[in-house]
Structures are given as structure tokens and as C-alpha cells.
């Protein structure tokens, strides 16, 4: 039977205090939350949208990997490895989803647009440049594949399923990511004000 100690451990695992983390790690944890709920939600909706079995199976695998990534970050405190694991996972999933969910007509472009702003806060300057180079090369390659080898793309069985999938993705990101972006903005403003006040105090002294 669980006691107070075990319950406190569960609370620490799922409820975070912003002041306990650096901004990079805080964004990483929230992105893991978003990806967790997205994969969990997709597990229930994908079978009804006529998506291929490969998407359903890979979505289940993605759910397991995200749980592992969350454990790596929250329990083991391996933030650097957690960021690398998460970024690698996202890039691989985006490529897979592009091929299996309608290419540029599916929800993958929305995933990319939602992911890029958060990518800025996840890595340092050097890795940020490398990441954007990878993204800027990756997307044109996917578009060229779609243009010249359309048989490699799995399209939706009907237009309604395609629109519903895009709508569900947009709703999830509106609910989870916009508050995160606002929080990051406010945090940066507060830090800037604090540093400015410290500078004024030092100048007066």
C-alpha cells in the first residue's frame, strides 16, 4: 500500500515547478508532454481515420519511446541525452509521417511548423545552426520525393479523414503549445527585467 512518500514521488514526476529547471530543460519536458498526449490521442483516432497499419504500429512504438524519454529526463536527470534522443525521434517521425500520411497534403507540415519554434529553445547556438541546416535540407528532399515518386506516399482514403486528422493535430498544439510559447516569452521578459534591475543597481553603487 502506497504511503505519502510514494505519492510525493508521483507528484514530482508529473507536476513540475518552473523555478527548478533551466529554460532548455523546461521546454523539453513540456514538449515531451505534448508529444505524449499527441501519440496517446493518435492511438485512439488513427484506426478511425483509415490510416495504414504501419502508422498505427509506429504510433504505439512512438508512445513507448516518449515514455522512455520522459523517464530519462525526469527520473535519471539526463537532460543532454534526453534532448538528443527527443530531437532525433522527432526528425525520424516527421519523415515517416510525411510518407505515410499524405505528404504535404497531410498534417506533417503542421507538425514541422509547431516543432521549429520550440527547437530554438531546446539546443544551444552551435547545434541550432546544424539543426536548421538539417531541416532546410530535409523538407525540400521530402517535397522532391513527393513530386517525382508519388507512389511512395500513402494518401488518405478520403478527404474528410485527411481534414479531420489535420484538425485534431491543430487543436492539440493550440491547447498545449501556445501556452508554452507564452510562458517562455514571459520567462524571458522577467529574466531580462531582473538583469536590467541588477545592472541599474550596480551602476548606482
Image (cartoon, rainbow, N blue to C red):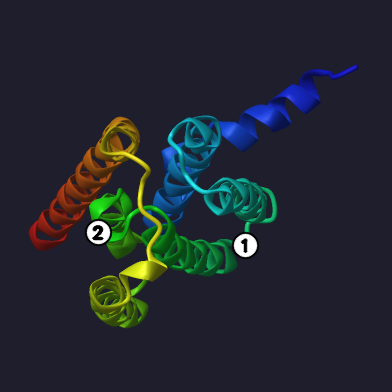
- Counting from the top left corner in percent of width and height, residue 36 is at 52, 41
Farthest-out residue, right: 1
Kindly identify the residue that appears in the image at 14 percent across and 54 percent down: 201
179 over 86 or under it: above or below: above
- Counting from the top left corner in percent of width and height, residue 175 is at 31, 30
As rendered, which of 104 and 50 lies closer to the eye? 50
What is the C-alpha distance between the residues marked 1 and 2? 35 Å
Kindly identify the residue that appears in the image at 33 percent across and 33 percent down: 168
Question: Callout 1: helix, strand or loop?
Answer: loop
As rendered, which of 154 and 122 lies closer to the eye? 154
Kindly identify the residue that appears in the image at 46 percent across and 63 percent down: 96
**Disc number for residue 104:** 2
Q: Residue at label 1?
A: 78
- Counting from the top left corner in percent of width and height, residue 98 is at 37, 61
Contact (CB < 8 A) between labels 1 and 2?
Answer: no
Give the mark, 1 or 2, whose residue is nearer the N terminus.
Answer: 1
**Disc number for residue 88:** none
Amino acid at each position: 500500500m502506497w504511503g505519502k512518500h510514494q505519492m510525493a514521488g508521483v507528484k514530482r514526476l508529473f507536476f513540475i515547478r518552473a523555478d527548478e529547471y533551466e529554460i532548455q530543460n523546461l521546454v523539453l519536458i513540456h514538449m515531451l508532454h505534448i508529444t505524449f498526449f499527441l501519440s496517446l490521442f493518435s492511438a485512439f483516432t488513427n484506426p478511425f481515420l483509415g490510416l495504414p497499419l504501419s502508422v498505427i504500429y509506429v504510433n504505439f512504438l512512438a508512445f513507448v519511446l516518449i515514455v522512455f524519454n520522459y523517464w530519462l529526463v525526469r527520473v535519471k536527470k539526463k537532460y543532454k541525452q534526453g534532448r538528443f534522443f527527443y530531437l532525433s525521434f522527432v526528425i525520424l517521425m516527421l519523415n515517416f509521417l510525411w510518407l505515410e500520411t499524405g505528404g504535404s497534403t497531410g498534417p506533417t507540415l503542421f507538425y514541422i511548423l509547431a516543432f521549429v519554434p520550440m527547437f530554438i529553445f531546446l539546443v544551444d547556438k552551435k547545434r541550432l545552426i546544424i539543426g536548421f541546416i538539417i531541416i532546410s535540407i530535409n523538407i525540400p528532399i521530402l517535397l522532391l520525393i513527393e513530386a517525382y515518386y508519388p507512389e511512395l506516399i500513402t494518401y488518405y482514403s478520403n478527404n474528410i479523414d485527411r481534414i479531420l486528422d489535420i484538425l485534431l493535430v491543430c487543436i492539440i498544439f493550440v491547447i498545449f503549445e501556445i501556452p508554452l510559447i507564452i510562458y517562455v516569452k514571459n520567462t524571458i521578459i522577467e529574466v531580462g527585467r531582473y538583469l536590467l534591475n541588477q545592472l541599474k543597481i550596480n551602476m548606482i553603487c
